[in-house]
Amino acid sequence: MEEFILANEPTLRLSVFIGLLATMGLWELLSPRRTPTFSKLRRWITNLSFSLFNSLMLRFLVPVLAVAAATWAQSNEIGLFNQIGFLNPVEWVLTVLLLDLLIYGQHVVFHYVPVFWRLHKMHHADPDIDASTAIRFHPIEILLSMVIKLGAVVALGAAPVAVILFEIILNGTALFNHGNVRLPLPIDRALRSLIVTPDMHRVHHSVIVRETNSNFGFNLSTWDRFFGTYCAQPEMGHNDMSIGLAEHRDDGPTKFVWSLVLPFRASREKELP
């Protein structure tokens, strides 16, 4: 299996991404949790444009991506796991867990450090939340995230296949938990005991500050519970809550250029959310 994953990495990642995005999009049409307040088509075009732009930017500006960094570290026996020599399945599970914890911690930092929040709020500016919101990030934030990930992969000495699995899992769970989909409450309760569900993550996109600063996890819900950042439900309820940023309630965030320059606009809010 390891050889198959390594040999087919681009195809696997793209296939899973397209398949899950299409599945979530169809699910949202058939069983939406909330009624959109802005044009879904316009938002999807903008958010997909950011995904394409960021992918091309990384290809041209970052000569080494996470899998290549893992391969280099493994070849040169650099990093924690390359020194310890765990069995492959154990190392893969630990890599996924530790990288997921890193993403949680990074997310918290990007909320509380003003200069990072200016970048990250472009993600939060989306006035509706659905699967396309999961791929809506400012290019500079994507670059910073890649640098952080590269450092973590090398420090861990993570196996290339473990990095691939982590990225596939993270992309998949992000598309799922940003979805504007309706889950039966018993299923939601069962799932969120381990992973972040759409109802759980939707709280994080509330305009209410204390709710924005909760539920930071993208994959495992356990980090929020352990570090005390878990919020079960939005104060106004899922149907009546407002999504996005309180200071941007117009259609500006649905536009590509507007969103791209958002971090550099004179802020009408406090620097911290």
Image (cartoon, rainbow, N blue to C red):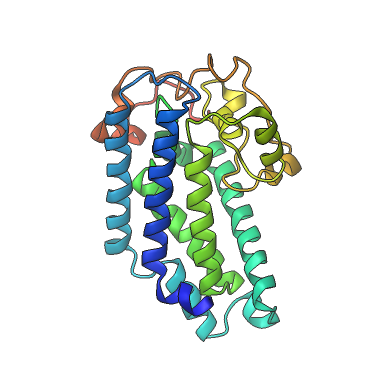
Residue situated in front as seen by the camera: 97 or 265:
97
Residue situated in front as seen by the camera: 3 or 85:
3
The percent coordinates of residue 210 (x first, y second) are: 62, 25
Residue at (34, 26) in percent of width and height: 266
The percent coordinates of residue 76 (x first, y second) are: 52, 85
Residue at (59, 59) in percent of width and height: 99
Task: Please state the total of marks drawn on the protein image.
Answer: 0
Task: Report the residue that reaches farthest toward the bottom.
Answer: 76
Q: Quadrant of residue 197?
A: top right
Task: Report the residue that reaches farthest toward the front.
Answer: 30
The percent coordinates of residue 70 (x first, y second) are: 50, 74
Can you see residue 125?
no
Q: Is residue 192 left or right of residue 26?
A: right
Residue at (33, 27) in percent of width and height: 40
Task: Report the residue that reaches farthest toward the left.
Answer: 257
Residue situated in front as seen by the camera: 144 or 13:
13
Can you see residue 116?
yes
Q: Is residue 51 left or right of residue 193?
A: left
Look at the picture and state if 40 lies above or below 106.
Answer: above
Look at the picture and state if 130 lies above or below 63.
Answer: above
Q: Is residue 22 left or right of residue 4?
A: left
Q: Quadrant of residue 82?
A: bottom right
Residue at (61, 33) in percent of width and height: 200
